[in-house]
Image (cartoon, grey):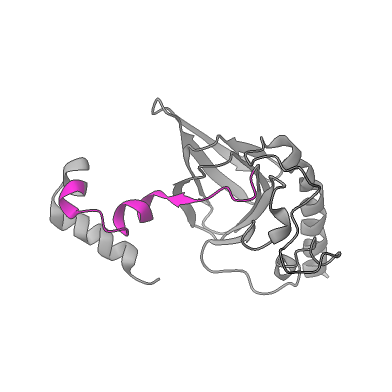
Amino acid sequence: MASRTSSLKFFSLLICSISIVQMVTAGDPDIITDFIAPPNGTVDGNFFTYTGFRVLIGGGPPPTTFTVLKATLAEFPALNGQSVSYAVLQFPSGTANPPHTHPRSAELLFLVDGTLEVGFVDTKNNLFTQTLQAGDLFVFPKGLAHFQFNADSQNPALAISAFGSANAGTVSIPSTLFTTGIDDNVLAISFKTDVATIQKLKAGLSAKP
């Protein structure tokens, strides 16, 4: 019964959070048709339906690592031209969504359950942070580096993020710097450290969890 109650609570909050989308500034080009149909597919109710979030309602085991479920253009083609997308963020205790950016949209995060430490850095290197409680909203401005962290050692956290683009894009700062083949000497000079330290960072990011 408790599991069913929890699932219904989450489902209700998910439906209510649809209004969040209206608050996010759209970043995609306008289209001159009602929607963009697939070139060689049938358009019916199924085209406009995405079922990838059903796993959240089924009462399965919670994830043991930070997990993102997305409904973007890649997963849900009907979003093409609609300037909206969603992500559900699941944070086991002590896990983080590492610093990253979304180059094509702001992000409006709604915390469904638990607590989160969040923050972003603006173009003047000012850091803005907040401790969110369930029911809080926080906006990460378009293109700015930001993060989320569940500092609670006992309880998970669950959040829903809305974007004003069907393809907001995600640029992970650690992965971009240390897994894309940037020369070790360039990174060592940039971070005022030595090549050995850079290689340790690269090895740590490349290792499988």
Residue 149 is left or right of residue 205, and the answer is right
Locate residue 55 relative to residue 65 in the image: left or right: right
Is residue 186 visible in the rendered structure shown here?
A: yes
Number of on-image labels: 0
Residue 59, image x and y in percent?
A: 73, 72
User: Of all residues shown, which one is farthest toward the top?
Assistant: 124
User: What's the residue at 33%, 70% (across, down)?
Assistant: 207
* Residue 16 forms part of the magenta stretch: no
Q: Is residue 85 above or below residue 93?
A: above
Q: Position of residue 30 (x, y in %)?
A: 70, 39
Residue ID at (18%, 47%): 186
The residue segment tinted magenta is 165-186
For the C terminus, the image quarter is: bottom left
Taking 156 as reference, is 134 above or below it?
above
Q: Residue 181's image quarter?
A: bottom left
Residue 29 image point, x, y percent = 65, 40
In the picture, which quadrant includes the N terminus? bottom right
Q: Residue at x 77, y 62 (%)?
A: 6
Classify 58 as above or below 170.
Answer: below
> Percent from the top left, x then y, of residue 107?
60, 42
Q: Is residue 113 visible?
A: no
